[in-house]
Image (cartoon, rainbow, N blue to C red):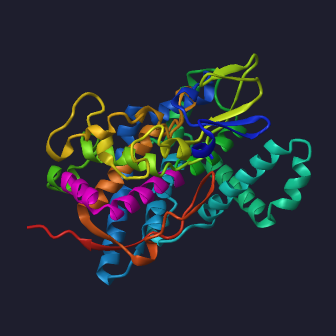
Amino acid sequence: MHDKYGEVVRLAPDQLSFTSVEATNDEDHARHRRLLAHAFSDKALREQEPLINKYVSLLVAKLSDVTQSALAVDMVRMYNYCTFDIMGDLAFGEPLGLLEQSDYTPWVAAIFGTIKTGVLIATITNNFPTLGAAIRRFCIPAALVEKRATHRRFAEARVDARLANAAHTERPDIWTFVLRHAASDAGKGLRLEEMHADGSTLMVAGTETTATLLSGLTYHLLRNPDKLRALATEIRDAFARPEDMDMASLARLPYLHACLEEGLRMYPPVPVGLPRIVPAGGRVVCGKPVPQGTSVYLSHYAAYRSARNFCEPDAFVPERWLGRDGDEGEGEGRRDPKYAGDVLAVVEPFSYGPRNCIGKNLAYHEMRLILANVLWHFDLDLCPESKDWMDQEVYTIWEKGPLMCKLKPVVRD
């Protein structure tokens, strides 16, 4: 629609969609952000790195088992197993066991239905505020409603169990930092119902989205073998042993960073916009007067694939991200000047401002560790049945099919 109608599209009487970087703006945040931020600080992430590495190593071991059988593997599932195991342990101090059992637990299976249910409820409520409750009863399948309730019950039970073990000191998890700082901030801690809600949110927002980016990036790399070779070479040349890979060293690899950024542009885990309500008095957005109470958002997929923002917007070109800070790079790493006019600042897949994703740094570290370890250990080939993998529907997040790949262990001298 944006290609046809321009940077601003009215989707409903009180809903506007934008694709310009000028549309991003936000208000300050509250105590939720302040308390949870401690768990996602650089210090906290360094303390949690061994836990993340444990599950990355288990992922590699499970993939190695598959290579012995010469069978194809669904990388969407494998990435999901790993990211859910990591967040389950970080958020509740105990493992979910997905990688161990190579299957989704009833809770994780319910989470996927929860996301779709939430989208349907929000759509109905926003567009039919008066009749919303009645319409929801008839339009949303009972099975989806039950999955949402199942997810909530599991999350609440895990939070309650973790709080009952408040002296948990074996290693830090998210609640370690929240409880520690809440104790020193008398009267401004989180209520139990807020902790339940946060536990539920962490298991939705901090898992599937990371696995989605890894799946989409893997697909685009496999469809562009020259880019895959360049990335694999950078990783394998930088590390003689997988044990040498850590958060700090991987963050210094320029082509890995460029591939992640281009993956987020081509396949943002949340391709739709995240709505904000225009405050009292209205605002001017992208030069357009917008009245108070209007729902506005930047449409990620539309903005990132817009020819107004990018040269060759549908091409997977990690090189467009090289040299963005003035370093033009050298040799194969040199930025092509044809992409110099790209509006890189429009790519904000974790949202923008004080309400951006609090787990952004954790997500980047997870993505680097997982992808780098997979490419250090294995050569991948895309199976024919997954060549059109990008043909997907969207319910706030992508409804992904299996990404079937053949893996072979890397042969080293």
Is residue 151 found left or right of 352 in the rendered image? right
For the residue pair 178 and 65, the one nearer the viewer reads as: 65
For the residue pair 257 and 301, the one nearer the viewer reads as: 301
For the residue pair 371 and 177, the one nearer the viewer reads as: 371
Name the residue at the top extreme.
281
Report x, y in % for residue 41.
43, 32
Report x, y in % for residue 46.
35, 38
Quadrant position of residue 105: bottom right
User: Is residue 328 visible in the rendered structure shown here?
Assistant: yes
Report x, y in % for residue 127.
81, 44
Name the residue at the front extreme.
4
Question: What range of the chain is rendered magenta?
Answer: 207-235
Quadrant position of residue 115: bottom right
What's the magenta bit mostly, secondary-structure-wise? helix
**Residue 222 part of the magenta-drawn span:** yes
Name the residue at the left extreme.
413
Report x, y in % for residue 18.
61, 35
175 vs 209: above or below = above
Is residue 201 found left or right of 359 in the rendered image? right
Q: Point out the image quarter for the C terminus.
A: bottom left
396 vs 412: above or below = above
**Residue 99 part of the magenta-drawn span:** no
User: Is residue 164 visible in the rendered structure shown here?
Assistant: no
Residue at x-position 66% and y-position 62%: 110
Residue at x-position 25% and y-position 27%: 326
Quadrant position of residue 371: bottom left
For the residue pair 284 and 43, the one nearer the viewer reads as: 284
